[in-house]
Amino acid sequence: MTTIGLIGSGYIGSTVARLAVAAGHDVVLSNSRGPETLRDLVDELGPKARAGTSADAAEAGDIVVVTVPLKAYRDVPAGPLAGKVVIDTNNYYPERDGRIAELEDGSTTTGELLQRHLGDALVVKGFNNIFFAHLASLGRPAGAADRTALPIAGDDPAAKQAAVEFLDSIGYDAVDIGPLAENWRTQRDTPVYATPYGAFDDPKGTPADARTIRDAVAAATAS
């Protein structure tokens, strides 16, 4: 099984970690506050989980999930991620991240920002359009009639295939929406952001198949 490194262990990161461990993967968790603050989560997850620094998670992971606030993306260690598949969950929230001119004018995307920072890593955008409670509840076995899909974007076909296989292992289909330049279609306030999976006050969520997600992605319009 694959080792999943997590740089950031908040709502999405901890949910991905739980799904990964349930699927048989090992996980290495990190956050900005230090490994000791993750003791309870590691204890919950059991022997397939350990905590470390962000560099530890980057070095240990076969796939590394970067799930930090966008304003902190420059703190992600680039060196140990060279050549690795990095799943980027970031969204741009100006009220939290500050105004970023390149995102405001549409000349780049959040995934492209992280790719530029990391250089030789292979960035795939994923997990950024679903509420963490729905991510926790909507996974289904392969072939299930009510299996949910998540969109991904990336510039490297092999990296995207690795992301597809990881998503499959934790209970989700994937919809490839193209290169990182297209990941604006899955950001906040687009049709595929949160809405297809149900209301925030319904923790069970609503299954959304690949066609539903593909149609929602196609309905996005540039501002």
Image (tube, rainbow, N blue to C red):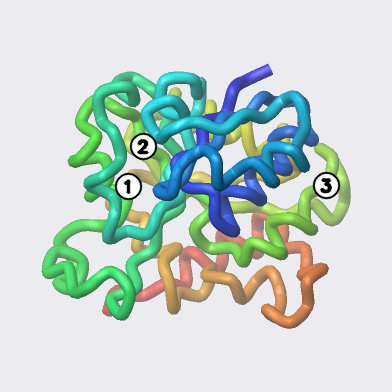
Earlier residue among tags 2 and 1: 2
- Can you say which quadrant of the picture contains the N terminus? top right
Q: Residue furthest front?
A: 36
Earlier residue among tags 2 and 3: 2
Q: Name which residue type carries label 1.
A: Leu
Q: Is residue 32 above or below residue 161?
A: below
Which percent across, then down, holds residue 111?
32, 49
| Distance from the alpha carbon under mark 2 to that under mark 3 | 25 Å
Tag 2–tag 1 contact (CB < 8 Å)? yes
Nearer the observer, 3 or 140: 3
Q: Is residue 120 above or below residue 75?
A: above
Q: From the viewer's perspective, is the residue at label 2 or at label 1 nearer?
A: 2
Residue at numbered disc 1: 180
Which percent across, then down, holds residue 54?
40, 35
Label 3 residue SS: loop
Tag 2–tag 3 contact (CB < 8 Å)? no
Few, some or many C-alpha atoms within 10 Å of disc 3 (few <14, some 14-19, many ≥20)? Answer: some
Q: Name which residue type carries label 2.
A: Val
Which percent across, then down, holds residue 115?
26, 40
Residue at numbered disc 2: 123
Earlier residue among tags 3 and 1: 3
Residue at numbered disc 3: 140
Label 1 residue SS: helix
